[in-house]
């Protein structure tokens, strides 16, 4: 069996990874018509169906090319992960029962509950399935925004550590038998060997088969994150190098348009920076025509343009739409203790989060704290200061503070405290029965050595709880891109399920000191989470603000996002349409006119599509919004959809 090629497209949210990866897959299928090619999306907020302009399910589907064999797969994370667990349920239960004080009946409900980190685990399993199937010559992966893709690349190492934990758990009988001079067979050895082989296959694929395509744009925020992305990949085990770069949404001919001339200069500067920073990587350029690249024909033209250097000729006509009426208005003042800002990657969530906090601080003089829970945050770019896990004052204002949650550091700090608690509790005689649970102590310590998948969403919930204390303070949460933001918002209810299961399971072992301590902690946690769940659905205490661009793909993803928010019963404060071109911005520039026509077609449908939601419009700024001066300019102008 020949080894399949693996291409992974990574980058900041909103830089066009889905478009570029889909164009690459179509291009490869047309260039190599005899090769079977799979385009696989690991982003929980899939948009391949929007790109191909046809419904796609969670099953592998043909792309309907005139020639070439391209198939498309939008991975259903929960379905994929459930199948993985169910195929191995008996062996997993057996291992965990032998390695702990709990019975199979006590453990089994946890396997049926929704587990954190399913998206990354499912993505990893899907990639392995595709590579090992022997059906494809080339597997192309459209990844989630970079913060969560980094978790994907780290997953094999986490899985390896988890396997070490399971092997130790499975060895309980061997350890005890050796202690008494006997012998015992290792439980679950076939399963553990199979999983070990899977991990080694994935590590080998990332090390030997993977070509990493980094997609970026000429915007400074995107370039900054691209440099951080590259550095993070080099620190992985094994380290990964960027094979190729795609400078997307480039403007190489500014013409007579002031905005486009600025973008042309930004494109030149970005190209020089990328060539200098990635001297060994190939650089491809994807120009911005002003029109969305959608459908097989659009992807075919764009793929030939980017990867063969052909002139971009894609120029579809925008749908006819009525004139959009806008009314000048003021930026809203945050009226609730908690505000969360959501949207697709790259639409300006961080900028709008900062602007809402900045305006509220100026108008009401209330203390404001803004926290990013995105694994790839960019508050430091907006505030032009180094922002870390600990809150710090920004813009020279002691009552305007910002932080970027470091979930890994937070987990390790919690793990260290938990190890101390376990060590003292498991050698305690408070129950009048001296119990030295050496094996259980070692087992827990091994489990806490690895940062588990899903830690971002879980710890983000705890960070929100910690920030909410002062009723007069306004807390703004700059969320991760859509797919993982929705996972975070579902996490409180999932934690409640886990706390109920844990309390029920621990009750059968309440004579042990460690179980008593754990029970108290779990009960307290459940109480706090219940309070948060009530707060999130209370429009007097919490609001969700959604940010979108007036473009085809962000528009469709926003529809799905608002539907999810409605199903979760979360109050929506407003919808911000960011970076809208005004007539005076466009003048006679063909590219800007084309872009504005497509924007108008999107905006004209919003009132009807999202009834009952206040829609604000932020005008396109030719410069990056950063620092006090940038935020002051940005918040000086806002419009409302009439």
Image (cartoon, rainbow, N blue to C red):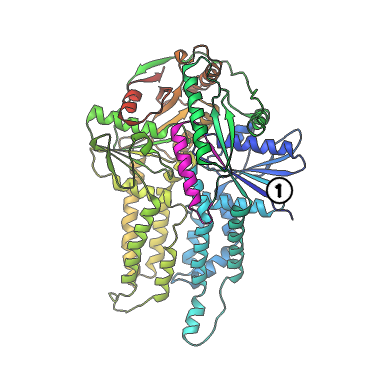
Q: Nearer the viewer, residue 602 or 244?
A: 244
Q: Helix, strand or loop at disc 1?
A: loop
In the displayed structure, 179 sits above or below 525; it is: below
Residue 94 % position (x, y) = 54, 69
Q: Which residues are magenta?
A: 213-239
Hey, which quadrant is residue 504 in on the image?
Answer: bottom left
Residue 624 % position (x, y) = 40, 28
Residue 553 % position (x, y) = 54, 30
Residue 207 visible in the current orientation? yes
Which residue is located at x 44 percent, y 33 percent? 220
Q: Quadrant of the C terminus?
A: top left
For label 1, the residue is 136
In the displayed structure, 102 sits above or below 72; it is: below
Q: Residue furthest bottom?
A: 181
Which residue is located at x 39 percent, y 57 percent? 499
Q: Quadrant of the N terminus?
A: bottom right
Which residue is located at x 44 percent, y 67 percent? 446
Which residue is located at x 54 percent, y 37 percent? 215
Residue 572 visible in the current orientation? no
Q: Is residue 397 magenta?
A: no
């Amino acid at each position: 069996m020949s080894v399949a090629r693996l291409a992974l497209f990574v980058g900041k949210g909103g830089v066009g990874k889905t478009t570029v990866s889909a164009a690459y897959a179509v291009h490869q299928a047309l260039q190599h018509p005899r090769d079977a090619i799979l385009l696989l999306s690991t982003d929980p907020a899939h948009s391949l169906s929007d790109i191909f302009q046809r419904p796609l399910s969670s099953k592998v589907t043909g792309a309907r090319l005139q020639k070439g064999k391209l198939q498309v797969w939008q991975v259903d994370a929960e379905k994929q992960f459930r199948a993985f667990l169910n195929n191995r349920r008996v062996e997993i239960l057996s291992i965990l029962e032998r390695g702990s004080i709990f019975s199979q009946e006590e453990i089994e409900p946890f396997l049926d509950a929704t587990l954190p980190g399913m998206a990354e685990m499912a993505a990893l399993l899907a990639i392995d399935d595709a590579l090992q199937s022997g059906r494809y010559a080339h597997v192309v992966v459209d990844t989630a925004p970079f913060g969560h893709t980094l978790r994907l690349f780290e997953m094999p190492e986490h899985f390896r550590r988890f396997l070490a934990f399971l092997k130790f758990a499975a060895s309980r009988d061997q350890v005890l038998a050796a202690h008494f001079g006997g012998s015992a067979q290792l439980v679950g050895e076939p399963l553990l060997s199979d999983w070990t082989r899977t991990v080694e296959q994935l590590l080998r694929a990332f090390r030997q088969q993977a070509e990493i395509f980094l997609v970026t744009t000429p915007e400074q925020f995107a370039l900054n994150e691209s440099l951080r992305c590259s550095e993070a990949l080099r620190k992985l085990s094994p380290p990964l190098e960027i094979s190729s770069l795609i400078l997307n949404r480039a403007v190489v001919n500014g013409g007579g348009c002031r905005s486009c001339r600025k973008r042309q200069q930004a494109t030149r500067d970005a190209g020089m920076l990328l060539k200098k920073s990635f001297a060994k990587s190939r650089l491809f350029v994807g120009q911005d025509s002003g029109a969305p690249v959608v459908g097989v024909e659009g992807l075919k033209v764009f793929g030939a343009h980017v990867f063969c250097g052909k002139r971009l000729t894609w120029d579809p006509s925008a749908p006819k739409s009525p004139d959009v009426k806008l009314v000048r208005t003021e930026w809203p003042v945050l009226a609730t203790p908690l505000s969360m800002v959501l949207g697709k990657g790259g639409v300006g969530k961080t900028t709008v989060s900062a602007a809402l906090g900045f305006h509220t601080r100026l108008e009401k003089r209330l203390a404001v704290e803004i926290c990013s829970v995105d694994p790839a945050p960019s508050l430091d770019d907006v505030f032009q200061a180094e922002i870390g896990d600990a809150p710090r004052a920004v813009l020279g204002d002691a009552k305007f503070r910002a932080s970027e949650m470091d979930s890994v550091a937070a987990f390790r700090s919690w793990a260290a405290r938990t190890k101390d608690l376990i060590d003292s509790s498991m050698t305690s005689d408070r129950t009048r029965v001296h119990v030295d649970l050496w094996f259980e102590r070692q087992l827990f310590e091994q489990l806490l050595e690895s940062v588990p998948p899903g830690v971002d969403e879980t710890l983000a919930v705890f960070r929100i709880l910690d920030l909410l204390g002062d009723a007069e303070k306004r807390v703004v949460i700059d969320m991760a891109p859509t797919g993982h933001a929705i996972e975070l918002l579902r996490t409180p209810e999932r934690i409640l399920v886990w706390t109920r299961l844990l309390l029920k399971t621990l009750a059968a072992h309440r004579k042990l000191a460690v179980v008593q301590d754990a029970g108290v902690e779990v009960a307290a946690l459940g109480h706090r989470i219940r309070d948060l769940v009530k707060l999130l659905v209370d429009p007097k205490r919490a609001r969700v603000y959604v940010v979108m661009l007036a473009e085809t793909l962000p528009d469709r993803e926003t529809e799905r996002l608002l539907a999810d928010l409605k199903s979760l019963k979360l109050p929506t404060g407003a919808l911000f349409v960011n970076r809208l071109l005004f007539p005076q911005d466009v003048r006679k520039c063909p590219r800007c006119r084309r872009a504005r026509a497509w924007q108008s077609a999107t905006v004209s449908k919003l009132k009807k599509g999202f009834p009952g939601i206040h829609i604000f419009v932020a005008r396109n700024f030719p410069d990056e919004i950063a620092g006090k001066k940038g935020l002051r300019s940005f918040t000086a102008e806002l419009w409302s959809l009439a």
